Image: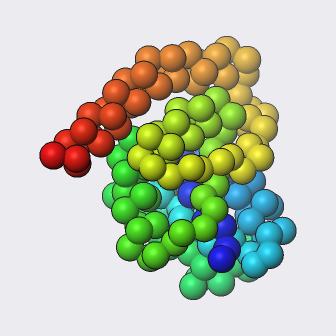
Amino acid sequence: MPAAIVILGAAVRPDGTPSPALRARVQAARAWGERQMPPAIYIPTGAIGRHPPAECVAMAAMLMQAGVPEDRIHQEPTGTDTFSSVLACVALLRRIGHVGEVRVATHRYHLPRSLLLFRLAGVPARAVPPPAGPAETGERRRWFWRMREVPALPYDAALMLWQRLRRKR
C-alpha cells in the first residue's frame, strides 16, 4: 500500500499563486513521495484563506503540473488551521480506506505540533523531510513562527484530547 502524505496548507497570494511556504511544502512532499514504491498518494489540505483558490486546490495544481496523476491526489478543502486540518485528514484517510503509512509535509517549526495532533487522533504519522525556510524570511521572522508554536502546541493538544474524550461517550 502506498504511503499517504498530508501536505499542510500555507498562504495563497492575492494573485492566486502559491506562497513560497506553500510551494516548499509541496516540493518536499513530492520529492519524498515520488521516490517511494509504490509512489505515495497526496492529501493537500486547506480551505480558501484570504485569497482564492483554496490552499488544497493550489497544491493539487502544483502536483499535477509536476506530473503526479490526479487519481493519486485527494484534496481536503475544509481545514482552516492545523487542528481542523488534522481532524479532516484523519476522516478522509478513513473514508478512502487508507491503512498504510502516513507522512506529514510541513516546515520544521510546525512538525512537532502537527505530528502530535495526528498521533493523538490515533494516526502514527511521521515527517517528510521538511523544506528549508523560505530564503526571503529573515531570522526574526523565523523566530516569530517558532514562538507562535509555543502556545499553539499545548492548546491544540488539549483540544484533540477533548475531542477524543467526546468521541468515547
Furthest-left residue in view?
Answer: 169
Quarter of image, res 68: bottom right
Query: Which residue is nearer to you in this view: 64 or 20?
Result: 64
Q: Position of residue 159 (x, y in %)?
A: 31, 32
The reply, left or right, for residue 67 in relation to residue 64 is: right
Residue at left offset 33%, top offset 34%:
161
Residue at left offset 58%, top offset 24%:
145
Query: Which residue is nearer to you in this view: 14 or 106?
Result: 106
- The answer to whether residue 1 is above or below residue 105 is below
Q: Position of residue 96 (x, y in %)?
A: 44, 76
- The answer to whether residue 61 is above or below residue 136 is below
Q: Would residue 53 be visible to someone looking at this image? A: no
Residue at left offset 60%, top offset 21%:
146
Q: How many marks?
A: 0
The reply, left or right, for residue 159 in relation to residue 106 is: left
Residue at left offset 41%, top offset 46%:
121
Q: Position of residue 155 (x, y in %)?
A: 37, 24
Dividing the image into 4 quarters, which one contains the N terminus? Answer: bottom right
Query: Which residue is nearer to you in this view: 134 or 99?
Result: 99
- The answer to whether residue 114 is above or below residue 79 is above
The colour scheme used to paint the residues is: rainbow
The reply, left or right, for residue 34 in relation to residue 64 is: right
Q: Would residue 85 be visible to someone looking at this image? A: yes
Furthest-right residue in view?
Answer: 35
Q: Position of residue 49 (x, y in %)?
A: 39, 48
